Image (spheres, rainbow, N blue to C red):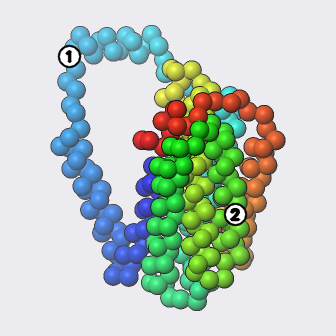
Amino acid sequence: MQMGVMLGPVLAYLVTFSYLMPFLVQSLITLFAAIMVFIFLPRSPVTPAAKMAQTQDAKAQAPAKLRFLDGRYSFFLIQALAVYICMGMVQQTLGFYFQDTLHIDGAEAAKLYSFSMIASAAAMLFAQLVLVQRLKLSPQQFILLGLPLFVIGFMVLALAQNGWMLYAGMAFFGFGMGCCGPSFSAAASLTVEPHEQGALAGLIGSLVGMGFVIGPILGGFLYAIDSSFPYLAATALTATVLLWSIFSKLPVTPSCSALGVGQS
């Protein structure tokens, strides 16, 4: 999911050929996915007896229903939501920010924006495939490692005067996401019972959507006031979450490498 969110904006580069090209490519990717599902998705025929047994089991054990503000894990969900809101603000406005900061046209801005997302995605993959695998840290410790990287990245973006600062800011952002993204899910999942894991996964999955509803609206509003305001707001929000994390007493959990975080 994180790779898709980070790599999807790379398609912005295609506007250098045509403004409709990204939509055409998205349509082809979606068609390819549909064909793969039709061909490879396993079909599981259910006999009448098995169907009756499944119905009885479903009635006997209703699925767990979890609340967003459940005290066991709400801390991690709020952290993740704040980060995804910041992510939505950045991705929604960054193309315009390239254009206004570097004084270039829309097509060139889209091309440079796509390069910055490649740099960010590469940093995220390096963090998950190298750092997470080698550092014996708990999910909470990785969160405390990633949040300062977010703060630095957003601050660099807010102060950017040239292309290199914009790329550097997005690289820090990618490192932060690589450390924090899987750790939010891992830390939250360790606070619930096994039969609650599915419901919690649903809550965690909804955070990306919530962030990409709130973030772009807030980012667009702030950008209309001043082009640096979305990045200053993201800096302030992630810094607040970082301070809250530092001064909150959280239970220590197994290391991410032991849990397999970053391996999937």
What residue is pinned by disc 2?
Answer: 152
Instruction: Name the foreground residue: 174 vs 209.
Output: 174
Instruction: Name the foreground residue: 144 vs 66.
Output: 144
Crowdedness near tag 1: few (<14), some (14–19) or many (≥20) residues, C-alpha within 10 Å = few
- Please identify the quadrant where the C terminus is shown: top left
Q: Judge from the rendering whether residue 5 lies leftward or rightward of residue 242; answer left or right.
A: left
Helix, strand or loop at disc 1?
A: loop
C-alpha separation, residue under disc 2 versus residue under disc 1: 57 Å
Q: Judge from the rendering whether residue 174 lies leftward or rightward of residue 225; answer left or right.
A: left
What residue is pinned by disc 1?
Answer: 47
Q: State the count of labels.
A: 2
Q: Judge from the rendering whether residue 97 lies leftward or rightward of residue 197; answer left or right.
A: right
Which residue: 47% across, 55% down? 125
- Name the residue type under label 1: Thr
Which residue: 60% across, 75% down? 166
Crowdedness near tag 2: few (<14), some (14–19) or many (≥20) residues, C-alpha within 10 Å = many
Above or below residue 43? Residue 150 is below
Q: Find residue 245 and report its horizontal and vertical position in percent.
A: 75, 43
Q: Find residue 147 and report its horizontal and vertical position in percent.
A: 68, 52
Which residue: 62% across, 36% down? 138
Which of discs 2 and 1 lies nearer the camera? The answer is 2
Specify whether residue 19 is in view. Answer: no
Are the residues flagged by discs 2 and 1 in contact, CB closer than 8 Å? no
Above or below residue 196? Residue 115 is below
Residue 219 is marked as: none
Which residue: 52% across, 21% down? 194
Q: Earlier in the sequence, mark 2 or mark 1?
A: 1
- Name the residue type under label 2: Ile
Q: Find residue 15 and report its horizontal and vertical position in percent.
A: 39, 78
